[in-house]
Amino acid sequence: QVQLVEAGGGLVQAGGSLKLSCAASGSRFSLYNMAWYRQVPGMQRDFVALITTDGLTNYADSVKGRFTISRDNANNTVYLQMNMPKPADTAVYYCNAASAGAALGGANSHWGQGTQVTVSS
């Protein structure tokens, strides 16, 4: 079992930058694929970015070229660097972890409590 705690959310101006972090505890972090999702009230939770145990990354088209996901296995932390954010990026951002054999965002994955990001125009 892994516990996830997000931090770093807040208010940011469009065109600025913000860095989210997700600290993991309780299990071997390096064995988990990690991802960020986001959700606007009343809408489904959407995929933002993922990073595998091998460091491979993938991004939603809407954030490609602006957001960067990274991980620090020594400190059990995954990050989301948000550059050039837009008002449309306003959402609650959730960290997600999935071990081998489990799907990111799936029923057997693990979620943090979320952190609010608000981008002002």
Image (spheres, rainbow, N blue to C red):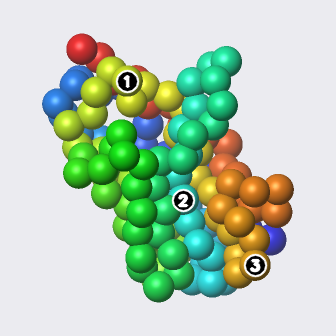
Q: Residues within 10 Å of mark 3 (few under 14, many from 20)?
A: few
Q: Which amino acid does label 3 sit on?
A: Gly
Residue 58 position in % (x across, y down): 42, 63
Label number found at residue 88: 1
Quadrant assignment, res 8? top left
Q: Do the residues labelled 1 and 3 touch (CB within 8 Å)?
A: no
Residue 34 appears left or right of 12: right
Query: What residue is drawn where x is 24% and y is 47%?
Result: 66
Which residue is labeled 3 in the image?
101
Expressed as whole percent of the image width and height from the top left, the position of residue 62 reads: 36, 40
Task: Mark 3 vs mark 2: give the one in front.
Answer: 3
Q: Where is residue 105 in the image (x, y as percent from the top left)?
A: 68, 54
Marks 3/2: CA–CA distance: 15 Å
Q: Which residue is drawn at 66% across and 50% down?
A: 112
Q: Which of the two discs, 1 and 3, labels the residue nearer the N terminus?
A: 1
Residue in view at x 40 percent, y 55 percent = 59
Residue 35: which disc? 2
Distance from Cα at disc 1 to Cα at disc 2? 19 Å
Q: Name the secondary structure under disc 3.
A: loop
Q: In which quarter of the image is residue 103?
A: bottom right
Decide: is 108 above or below 95.
Answer: below
